[in-house]
Image: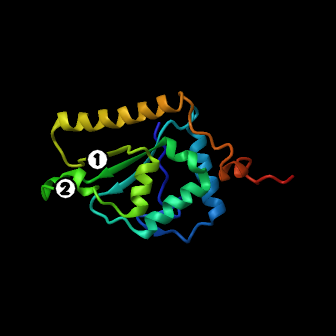
Amino acid sequence: MVVAVPNNWYPFVGGLFNYDASSEFIDKEILKSIDLAKDGLHAVLMVFSTSCRFTWEDVDVINHIKDLFGDMIFDYMIIVYTGGDNLEAVKKPFEEYIRDPPEPLENLIHLCKNRVVLFNNETKDKVKRQEQVNLLISLVNSIVASNDGKPFSIQGSNLSSTSNGEGDQS
């Protein structure tokens, strides 16, 4: 199951902050999205584009996710880059593209145990498309195995206090 979070739910949209929604509202909507996955979350995809630079806003997103879910979220995270077609157009191998990332991105890659995959959004090559999907599925399966099949739980995260919709009143 894939839970997509609409742009107006999340405070960080396209590298920009959404100041129209309160942090409390956003946290509750994220919790609702997680609850949609009845069997739990076995993998979380952090998506970047090769056509965009890694920015300090991206660092803020990563820190916000860490604040909400705790460090354990990275045990379930895969970094997905889109725009492999952009790299092919300039004949730049993906390994070269991510060779010397900014320190916060390097740290994220390390926290995610080097689970990084590139997708070519424009390829018409059915074999290449299937290989991309197979690699992603393989990474998801490795996450499931390394977590003994247990899905990510919000228990103990900062979101767990909003699980009843009102926070803990005791």
Q: Residue 134: horizontal and vertical position, in percent?
A: 30, 32
Q: Nearer the viewer, residue 53 or 34?
A: 53
Residue pictured at 53% horizontal, 64% vertical: 11
State left or right for residue 64 relative to residue 25.
left
Decide if residue 41 is in sight here. Answer: yes
State left or right for residue 22 relative to residue 167.
left
Q: Residue 61: horizontal and vertical position, in percent?
A: 49, 61
Query: Which element type, helix, strand or loop, lies under badge 2?
Result: helix
Residue pictured at 23% horizontal, 47% vertical: 120
**What residue did someone put label 1 on?**
118
Q: Nearer the viewer, residue 79 or 109?
A: 109
Give the farthest residue toward the right. 170
Q: Quadrant of residue 15?
A: bottom left
Query: Which element type, helix, strand or loop, lies under badge 1?
Result: strand
Q: Quadrant of residue 38?
A: top right
| Residue type beneath disc 1 | Leu
Q: Residue 152: horizontal and vertical position, in percent?
A: 57, 39
- Give yes or no for contact between labels 1 and 2 (Cβ–Cβ under 8 Å): yes
Residue pictured at 44% horizontal, 69% vertical: 56
**What residue did someone put label 2 on?**
87
